[in-house]
Image (tube, rainbow, N blue to C red):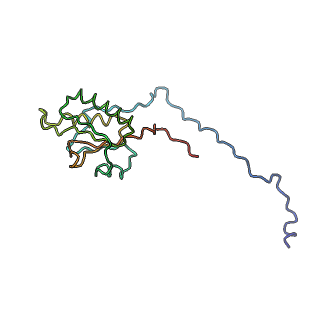
Amino acid sequence: MFRTAMGDVEPLAANRAEPYRERPPPIPRPQPADAEPEQPELLAESQVETHDYLLFARPGVQKRVVAELQRGRIEPELEVDLHGLRAAHARIVLTEFFADCRQRRVRCARIIHGKGRGSDSPQPVLKCKVNYWLRLRQDVLAFCSATRRDGGTGAVYVLLRNPDKDGTRRARR
């Protein structure tokens, strides 16, 4: 019965699967001639609001990681004390501090900026400057005010980017 049903069937010419072919690269959409390449927006210091409690996280940083940072569960490996310094000197010290953090492969650091009670201005100068400077640094993933035991609103925990990750994605194997 099977042979009668298959009597008029002809075998296929190829008995293997079709070989893998790479797809051609996508064709980019034409850009208008007057369009300029996008540049990252520069952040002006006047655009940054400094509240009593500081909190900042870059897009893509997990909420769970930020919550752990806020609770003080990520132990700061290095710290720097800026309070009492002038803003220009504090920026130099902070730049050197971040270079040291990168060299030592520090993932979490604490910056003590003080509460600004001794300043003449209504807002703490160093706290405002640190809030602004940290947002400009690409190696800073997130920061928040420290817990009471580590300085409260007079200090910040800073979560730093892994220096081994340069921002490029590796190909999966």
Residue 25 vs residue 97, the one in the foreground: 97
- Picture coordinates of residue 153 (x, y %)? 20, 44
> Which quadrant would residue 25 be assigned to in this image?
top right
Left or right, 62 with respect to 31, comes to left
Looking at the rendered image, the quarter that the N terminus falls into is bottom right
> Which quadrant would residue 113 be assigned to in this image?
top left
Total labels drawn: 0
Residue 20 vs residue 29, the one in the foreground: 20
Give the residue at the far bottom of this rendering.
1
- Picture coordinates of residue 143 (x, y %)? 30, 43
Left or right, 115 with respect to 27, comes to left
- Picture coordinates of residue 145 (x, y %)? 25, 45
The correct choice, above or below, for 16 with respect to 35 in the image is below
Residue at figure coordinates x 24%, y 30% from the top left: 90
Residue 167 vs residue 114, the one in the foreground: 114
